[in-house]
Image (cartoon, rainbow, N blue to C red):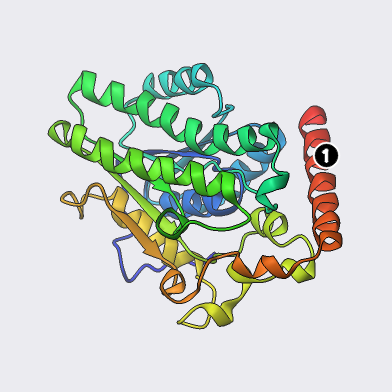
């Protein structure tokens, strides 16, 4: 991934210490790469040791201007694990920023969603963001330190979205958390913001949201984006760099869309999935389930 050095100084994040949940893959890893290249000490976490090891090997190649990378095994669905991880990080020095990036999602007709499926998404997206934010916020407040929280959301928090109901509900809860804590923690000089990316294709997320060709609509269709293209990763990294820097200390409680105008033009991100037949859904569900079983097997052997 290329960095856009003309927008920021190379050392714009020097002295920053930022935790990215779910930072071993996808958007999280690219954000980590960008932060490190701009001087930050970055901490990533995830549930799979082999994924984290591979990510750290990649990220260390981006180390420049004092940037470093360190990884922790942590299940963000468990408050105790998050608190223990943050305590361990704090032993080396307090964090300056948090990016709530860990996510889970799948496409499905809402009538077919099981309690277990809903809980899997909710616990990762909503519970994980809350636990991580509180773990950092409590320490910042206790020590009288400023902080910056940025949660990775979606434009569905404004529009809703068919066929991804658990994610739409969980992300909306984090949106509410963002606005609520921005007011409550403003007096502590802790900024709480969010970003709502549009279609920035990443391998893991795209396979779950478009497992078969007929599902390659909505979020995966550049024709529905007014700017006529997918987002470019450096554009997203520039926005997150800005929010974690010292250049926007008056921004808090905001959820910033970066989607090429997609949510303003399209009726709903996944509305066109209404065209799928029951056979199409069965095929998609089978493929997603197979990939999930492969990931589970990798975790058990990793």
Provide residue 124's location: percent of width, then percent of height: 56, 35
- Is residue 151 visible in the rendered image? The answer is yes
Figure quadrant of the C terminus: top right
Answer above or below: position of 168 versus 214: above
159 or 293: nearer the eye? Answer: 159
Query: In the orientation shown, which residue stands out farthest toward the front?
Result: 111
Is 122 located above or below residue 29 in the figure? above
Does residue 264 appear to the left or right of 254 in the view shown?
right
- Between 136 and 259, the one lying in front of the other is 259
Which residue sits at x=20%, y=32%?
A: 184
Classed neighbour count for the residue bearing mark 1: other residues with Cα under 10 Å, few (<14), some (14–19), many (≥20): few
Q: Is residue 182 above or below residue 47?
A: below
- The answer to whether 61 appears left or right of 188 in the picture is right
Q: Nearer the viewer, residue 31 or 283?
A: 283
Residue visible at 62% across and 47% down?
Answer: 105
* 161 in relation to 97, above or below: below
| Residue 96 percent coordinates (x, y) | 30, 36
**Residue appearing at x 57%, y 82% in the figure:** 223
Relative image position of residue 9 (x, y in whole percent): 29, 61
Query: Residue drawn at (76%, 66%), measured in percent from left and top?
Result: 276
Q: Which residue is mark 1?
A: 293
Note whether residue 12 is visible. no
Quarter of the image that includes the N terminus? bottom right
The image shows residue 5 at horizontal and vertical percentages of: 37, 67
**Total numbered labels placed on residues in the image:** 1
Q: Secondary structure at mark 1?
A: helix
């Amino acid at each position: 991934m290329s960095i856009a050095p003309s927008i920021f100084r190379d050392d714009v994040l020097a002295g920053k210490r930022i935790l990215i949940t779910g930072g071993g893959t996808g958007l999280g890893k690219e954000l980590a790469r960008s932060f490190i290249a701009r001087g930050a000490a970055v901490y990533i976490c995830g549930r799979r040791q082999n994924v984290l090891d591979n990510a750290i090997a990649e990220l260390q190649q981006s180390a420049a201007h004092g940037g470093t990378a360190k990884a922790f095994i942590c299940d963000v669905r468990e408050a105790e694990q998050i608190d223990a991880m943050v305590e361990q990080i704090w032993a080396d020095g307090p964090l300056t920023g948090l990016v709530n990036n860990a996510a889970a999602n799948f496409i499905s007709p809402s009538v077919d969603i099981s309690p277990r499926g809903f809980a899997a998404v909710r616990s990762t997206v909503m519970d994980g963001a809350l636990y991580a934010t509180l773990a950092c916020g409590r320490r910042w407040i206790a020590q009288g330190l400023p902080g910056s929280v940025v949660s990775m959301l979606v434009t569905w928090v404004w529009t809703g979205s068919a066929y991804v109901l658990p994610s739409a509900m969980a992300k909306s809860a984090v949106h509410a958390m963002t606005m609520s804590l921005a007011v409550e923690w403003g007096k502590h000089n802790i900024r709480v913001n969010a970003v709502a990316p549009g279609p920035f294709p990443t391998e893991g997320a795209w396979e779950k949201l478009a497992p078969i060709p007929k599902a390659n609509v909505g979020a995966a269709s550049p024709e529905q984006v007014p700017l006529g293209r997918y987002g470019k990763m450096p554009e997203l990294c520039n926005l997150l760099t800005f929010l974690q820097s010292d250049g926007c200390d008056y921004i808090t409680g905001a959820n910033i869309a970066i989607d090429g105008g997609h949510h303003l033009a399209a009726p709903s991100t996944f509305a066109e999935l209404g065209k799928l037949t029951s056979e199409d859904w069965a095929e998609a569900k089978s493929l997603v389930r197979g990939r999930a079983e492969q990931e589970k097997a990798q975790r058990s052997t990793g």
